[in-house]
Every structure is written in structure tokens, then in C-alpha cells.
Amino acid sequence: MLEIGFVFAFIGRQLGRVLTLAFNWATIVLFGRVPQDRQLYLSGMALTALLWPIVLAGIAFPSFATFLLGFFTVPDWLKGWVRLVMLVLAILLPLANGALSARLPDEGKRPRGRALATTILRGYPNSLALFVVLIWMMIVAPLGQIRALLRRWEAAHVPIAVKPAGYDAVVHDLAEALDRAGIRVTRKRAHWAYELPGKVLAILGGDTVRSLVPVQLADLVGDGFEMTLHPMDLSLVGRKKTLSHARAAIVRELTFTEAYQTWSKEAQAVEDRLIKAARGEDDLDAIGTELNERDFDFEEWEILYRLLLQVRLRVSATETDALDSADEPKPALRERVATAARVLVGRSNGH
């Protein structure tokens, strides 16, 4: 009994993370990068998207909706009033979704007048798109976990947000990283179930959204290892040892490819600066100071801090953040000690 409870708890944790990633990606595709102080609007949009189909069903089946929403059924004499309430909510919830989406851009870029009315009306297709993405991932994610358990493989998810038009570049970079780690993989098209959320967003979101959604999702498949790159999530399954090596290689590579590992606009701006710093176009010390002074969510701060250290190691005298640098000439011991000291105290190393 304890083992079954552990399995369900594990699946629940993974599902929650995947749903968060799916919703973050869907909102990025539909509305662009969202500032951290507007996360409450996103929560409201998710709630309205999930409630809308329930109240639609409640117009025909009032007791079904009231049971899902409040765990009670209504008597026959009250069903007419419940239908009326559900009809009103079915009209208002998508409009509320559209109104919340209009609050996501910066103050000077928010729609006004006719553009505001259009944005509010777009709440109908946007609500449907968000609902399909969330519900579909609630189905697909547990099935993926169960499949891994049946094969006695382990599963992992790495949070990412692929940059616009960067999907193929990320697939290529990750394949190269796996190859350097000794994991030979072949690129294949992902199962249609994983492509469905992107297809729905592309259809309902219009031409602008369609240009941001990859035409085909890719699997990288090797011996005892499979990886599916979603625009909002990196899903990995495989044997324990292979998966461990793959995760290490991938985490190193994600710092320098066309994908974000954070989700707020402010944190992603720091990621952009770190990429520039890796090319010698920005000051790592200034980025470190900003990281200490800004009020980031702890999980995002932790990710940014790791990326900062990776970039600092990449531009150090060793010129790598890999654990094994046997293929590269090693600097003198005195130089390596000096470099390590500079990294620890956070000072510039002259590169």
C-alpha cells in the first residue's frame, strides 16, 4: 500500500511541474514574456480556462457542473436557475480571460480602444487553447511516467522555454552534447500526442502564434534513453546511469543554447545578459550584483546563480564547465589554483 501511495505521489509531483511548464509555455506563445509582477493575472487566466468547459456542460447538465464545482447536486426545481447562472458564466469567463490577458503587457504597450475589445474577445479561443493544453498534459504526462515505470526506467523533466525560431538549434545542440557524453542518439519525430498542444495553439492563436510553434516535435532516441523536446519542457526517460550522464550533459548545454530555463521576463533578461557575457559582450560582475539585488523567486534565483557560475567557468582559463577536460591541455597548477580562487570570491579573472 505504501509503494502504491509513493507511486501516485511521485506522478502527482511530476504532473504538477509539467502542467506549470505547459501553461507557462502556452502563455508565452500566446501573449509573450510576462513580467514577474503579473503572475496573478496568469493564475486567473488558468482558472477561467479550466472553469469555462465545466460551466458550458452545466447548461445542459446542471447537477454535473455543481458536483464538479462544489460536490453537490441541485433539485429539479432549481435546475432552471442554475442553467441561467451557467449561461451567464459561460459568456463572462472567456471575456474575463481576455481582459486579464490585456493586462499582461507593459503599461505603455497595453491595447486600448478597438484593440482592447479585440483582445477581450480573443478570450474565447485563448480559453479553449489553454484548456486543451492543460487537460491534454494531465493525460499525457502520467502516461509517460507509467510507461517509464513499467520499463523500469527513470524519468526526469528539465524546465525550459525554447526561444522563437530556436527549436531546431536546441535539438542540434542537445544531440551534440549527448554525443560528447558518449550517448549516441538518432532524431525521430515525436508521437502525435506530444504535438497536439502546439497544434491547438497554432490553430486557435492565429498566424503570429503559428510562427512560434514548431512544425514537428523531435525525439532523440538512443540505447536505453529517450528524450522529447517540447517548447515548454524537456522530457527524459532511460536507464538510471544513462539518464544521469544525459542530464549532466544537457544541463551544461542548455546554458548556451536557444532556450530559457526561467519563466519570468526579468529572469529571462538576465539569461540573455549571461549569453552575452559568455561571448565577452557583458560584465559578469555586474550581472552578479544585479542577481543579488533583484527580488527573484528563489527557484529562479537558484537557476540564474547556477548559470552565472557556468558562464564564469566557461570564460575562465580552463575555458570549459565540463567535469572531464581530458581532451584539452591543462593549465599549470598555479594558474588553475588562481582561477579557482577568483571564481570563489566572485572577482573578474581578466577574460
Image (cartoon, rainbow, N blue to C red):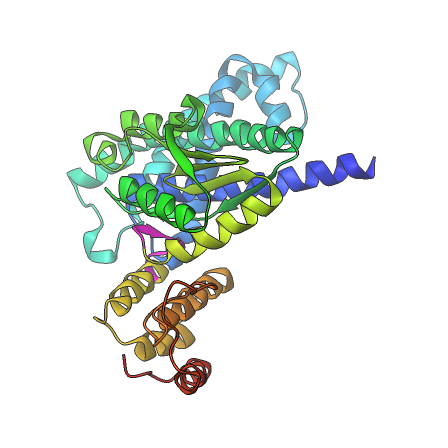
Quadrant holding the N terminus: top right
Is 1 one of the magenta-colored residues?
no
Q: Is residue 69 left or right of residue 30?
A: right
Residue furthest right as drawn = 1
Q: Position of residue 236 (x, y in %)?
A: 50, 40
Vertical arrangement, residue 33 with respect to residue 67, above or below: below
Residue 124 appears anywhere in the view: no
Drawn side of residue 246 relative to residue 78, left or right: left
| Residue in front for this viewpoint, 32 or 74 | 32
On the question of residue 201 being in view, the answer is yes
Q: At x 57% / y 22%, what residue is drawn?
A: 65
The answer to whether 118 appears left or right of 274 in the picture is left
Q: Is residue 220 left or right of residue 287?
A: right
Q: Main secondary structure of the magenta part?
A: loop
Which residue is drawn at the image coordinates 54% and 21% (left, top)? 82
Q: Quadrant of residue 141?
A: top right
Residue interval drawn in magenta: 257-266
**In the picture, residue 118 is in which quadrant?**
top left
Considering depth in this image, is 319 or 288 the residue closer to the camera? Answer: 319
Q: Nearer the viewer, residue 311 or 97?
A: 311
